[in-house]
Image: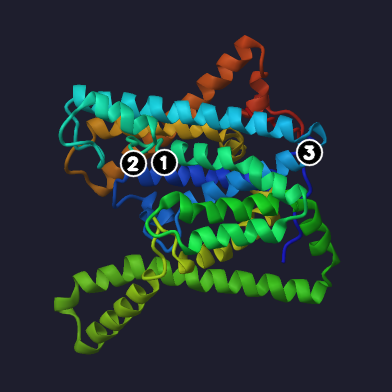
Amino acid sequence: MAKVAAASPSNRILSLDIIRGMFLVVILIDHIELYPSLFAFFTGEGRLYVSAAEGFFFLSGIVVGLVYRRRLVRGFSFIFKRLWRRAAELYLLSVAFTLFFTWLAIVSRHTNIKYGLPSEINWPHILYQSVILHYTFGWADFLSRFAILTFLAPFAIYLLARGQLRLLASASILLWFFRGTNFIAAWQLIFCLALIIGFYWNEINDWAASVRQPLKSRLRQTVMISAGVTFAFSYLSMYLMSYLQNAAAHQPLWLNNFTWTWNNFDQKIWHYCDKFTLGPGRLAFFLLWFSALYMIVEKYQPAIRKYSRDWLLILGQNSLFVYIAHAFIVFIFKMFIPAQTSFLQNTFITALALLALAGAMTLRALRDDQLGTRPFSDFYLLPIFRRSNSATTDK
């Protein structure tokens, strides 16, 4: 397996920031939801066995584990207070954005812009349901879920600090096993697993360094080959098999039989890959694919930073702002997207949405520079602003 990256001088693990930036780009593209397009071929249209959302949850858990392991010296009172304040911020943002996007959809007469809007508008009921987090609307709906998990996170850190790893892991797995159709009960498993990994990051690093090179190489090859084969199968099942099914009338019998056999096998896999309840197959594929992605990004990090002009790094290190900005961009764009679009139009509109995200990030950089909270050069926006190899700090 790949050696776990050492933290940068600013205590950031840049490979994880880059991956989070990648996931945010994929989330924006898939939420714009214009298919077919050139970008859709890179994202899988959110219809593969795993989506970027799982990765976003996972990385958030890793960051919590990493950061608050270092802050144990400040005491549990500090950790509870800090995380609960963060949870309160996410909660208030979730309620505010839900109400705002609901109002905007109604006044703009775009009530079909996204599923979930009540058919009968009753503002007191909507307000109550929003406050208790039973109703969310818009493309920032994950904020409510992050608020709940962030509220619970200090309890998990307390157990880990007391050496109760088995108790925490058992409770998380048990909750997932009896999850039913509860999203939080299902997805807390990803967050909890990531928090554990973040908490024990240094120990994992030491273990990876102690593995002998021949075994390490075999493990790495096994992960990369397994991830490559399963990803390719999922990708081809969505694109190639769909094409063969649509062209069934013009194919020989043997190819039709092959297509339907393939489809039946794919459906059996999907039985264990439900997204909302985090099926066991989806969890297994995610862990496998994420491991392979991390190895790739860790190996080619300098090239990725160079050719992306550090934009993926910037997005990943400003994830909350980027996630909120993406929600506004998607909502506004969907208000003006024509009912019928072509491949070229889809590609062009999605590119504009990505440029809008870059513009929002640039405006934030200029604002922070004017307020004196963060130099504009820290955002690496243009080559002339680049500094030597220093890493940007988080929000």
Separation (CA) of disc 3 from disc 2: 41 Å
Residue 32 numbered tag: 2
Residue placed under numbered mark 3 in the picture: 72
Res. 187 in view: yes
Which residue in the rendered view is the most extreme toward the bottom? 254
Q: Residues within 10 Å of mark 3 (few under 14, many from 20)?
A: some
State the image coordinates of residue 87 (x, y, percent, origin top left): 55, 32
State the image coordinates of residue 5 (x, y, percent, origin top left): 75, 52
| Figure quadrant of the N terminus | bottom right
Separation (CA) of disc 1 from disc 2: 6 Å
Q: Residue at x 22, y 73 (%)?
A: 245
State the image coordinates of residue 108 (x, y, percent, origin top left): 20, 24
Q: Residues within 10 Å of mark 2 (few under 14, many from 20)?
A: many
Cβ–Cβ below 8 Å for labels 1 and 2? yes
Looking at marks 3 and 2 on the same chain, the residue that comes earlier in the sequence is marked by 2
Cβ–Cβ below 8 Å for labels 3 and 2? no
State the image coordinates of residue 240 (x, y, percent, origin top left): 32, 70
Residue 306 figure quarter:
top right
Q: Looking at the image, is mark 1 or mark 3 nearer the viewer? A: 3
- Label 1 sits on what residue type? Leu
Residue 28 numbered tag: 1
